Each structure stands twice: as structure tokens, then as C-alpha cells.
Image (tube, helix red, strand yellow):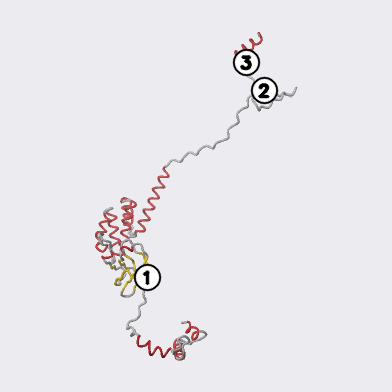
Amino acid sequence: MKFVQGNFFAGETFLDLADARSKMAAWLAAANGRVHGTTRQVPAVVFAGQEAPCLLPAPAERYQVPYWAQVKVHVDYHIQVARALYSVPWRHVGARVMARADEHLVKVYLRDQLIKTHPRKQPGGRSTDTADMPPGVEGYATRTVDRMIAQAASYGPATGIYARRLLDGDAPWMMMRSVYRLIGLAKRYGPPAAEAACSRALDVDVINVSKIESMLKNATENTRSSRCSRTPPRTPRRPAWPRRPAPVLAGSPGMRPSTPPRPGSGCRSSTAATRPAAAGPDLLTAAGKHVAA
């Protein structure tokens, strides 16, 4: 490819596709008639004598460009390719696989190793091999739509009707995972909440499991917020104010001596303010004893 790009296309200008093809034919005749630098042989002679007899006839049908997709193996042992379901051996649940689809076949590869082949199905179709199911477990292919509706109806009549509306179509198998999701929501939030959400959605003719999940989440959050609003607010604690220092008594260590008032200043001494206004009888008796002594 580098030889063709560098020796033919580089620096060339073509008027149209026909002009490019005519110039390419002349260039190939000259390039294939030269002696190859590595093999020291003429390419046209080697092709006519050794390679041309080994070639297979060209296919009569047009080459089919395959469709490649990286998909995940779900818990129901199936993958989705071009809106159709195909089973994969159960031991590969949770793995990421590569799927190659053409007009006739769908091939599944895990780390470049072919693990499953199915005939191609139309969008909405399903191809299930019971050998892909784990031993001792009822096959996914044996589950019917009526059984899934009955399982959903066990959580309430509105939930069963909602599941029936989900599966009401030309390709009910494509909506089975939505019904599984609806059943999981009923288990998580409880049958009463699921019944209320399904009934409200049926009233407005909204058939979407994501809407049901959103309604259940909002109802749960509103219930929590209402509980918090009914709880009385806590009384804030009063701040701890600094306590006043205890009064210092006369004669205690560290007390500064009081200064006597100046004559004529009209100010009282601080010690006079602390004296009692009148002496009690006990103090008078004690003073009389002291004089008598």
C-alpha cells in the first residue's frame, strides 16, 4: 500500500474516476513488469505461474458488511443485538462480549473466541437455546407472557393490568425486562405503593416503567419530608455566659488595702459601705463583755 500511495497517488491529479482507472492500469503494467527489489523476480510472472491457479472463484453475491457491537450478557442469559434477543451460555452472565451480525447469522465472541452462533432474527424477535440455561433451573424460553402477568398481578390488580399493557404489542418478548423491573419496584417499595403508582399512571395512560419508578421515589421523599416537618424543632441551648468573679472579702490574701477618704471630699470609704446599718443583740452583748473585762 505504501508503494502504491507513494509512487502512483502522491502528487497526481485526476479528472474523474475513469481517468484514475486508466492511469492506474498503465502504471500497474509498468510496476508489475519490473524486477522486485526483495524477491528479485518479476511480479507479473510469479502471479501468473504460482498465485493465479490457487485463487478461488469470486463470490456471486455481494459482500455483506457485518454489524459489530459490544454488549453485556444479562441475568436472563440473553444479549440484545439490533433490537433482537439471543441466548448465551449461562456461565458468561455479566461478561462483555462482541457480537457480529450479518444478514444470516449472529456470532458471539468472548476474547476473540467464538462461544455462540444464532440465526439472524428481525427486530423484536428472540432466539433461545435451552442448552444455554443452567442445570436445574427452568428455562427462560418456557416462560409465557401469561405467567409474567400473573406474577405481576400477585402484587395487586393495577400492577397486573400495567404489566399486561407493557406486554401488549407485536413483540412482547422485548418488554419482558420492563415487566421484571416493574416487579422489582413492587418488591422494593411495597405492593400498596406500587398499586397506587400503577393506578395513577393508568388513569393518564402513561405506560412507562421509568415513570413508575420516578413516582415511587418522589412519594418516598415526600413521606420523609412530611415526617421531618411534624417533628418539633429542638430548643436551642443558651450560650454559656462567663461567670462573674467572686467578691473578695476583707483580709483575704491578695486584697488591696482601702484608701481612706480625704477630709472634706464628701466621699465615703469603701469599708464603710460594707458595715451593717445596725448591730444585732449578739454583737452588743459581746461588746459589753469586752468592756467589762
Instruction: State yes or no: discs 3 and 1 in contact (Cβ < 8 Å).
Output: no
On the image, the x and y values in percent for residue 90 come to 30, 63
On the image, the x and y values in percent for residue 128 come to 27, 66
Q: Is mark 2 on a helix, strand or loop?
A: loop
Separation of marks 3 and 1 at Cα, in angstroms: 113 Å
Residue plotted at (64% across, 20% down) = 275
Q: What element carries label 1?
A: loop
Pointer 2 residue: 271
On the image, the x and y values in percent for residue 147 come to 24, 59
Q: Between label 2 and label 1, give the one nearer the viewer.
A: 1
Can residue 19 be seen here? no
Q: Between label 3 and label 1, give the one nearer the viewer.
A: 1
Name the amino acid, label 1: Asp
Query: Quadrant of the rendered structure where residue 82 is?
Result: bottom left
Quick check: 180 left or right of 267?
Answer: left
Separation of marks 2 and 1 at Cα, in angstroms: 105 Å
Name the amino acid, label 3: Ala
> Mark 3 or 2 closer to N-term?
2
Name the amino acid, label 2: Thr
On the image, the x and y values in percent for residue 38 come to 47, 85
Instruction: State yes or no: discs 2 and 1 in contact (Cβ < 8 Å).
Output: no
Say which of 157 and 286 sits in front: 286
Pointer 3 residue: 279
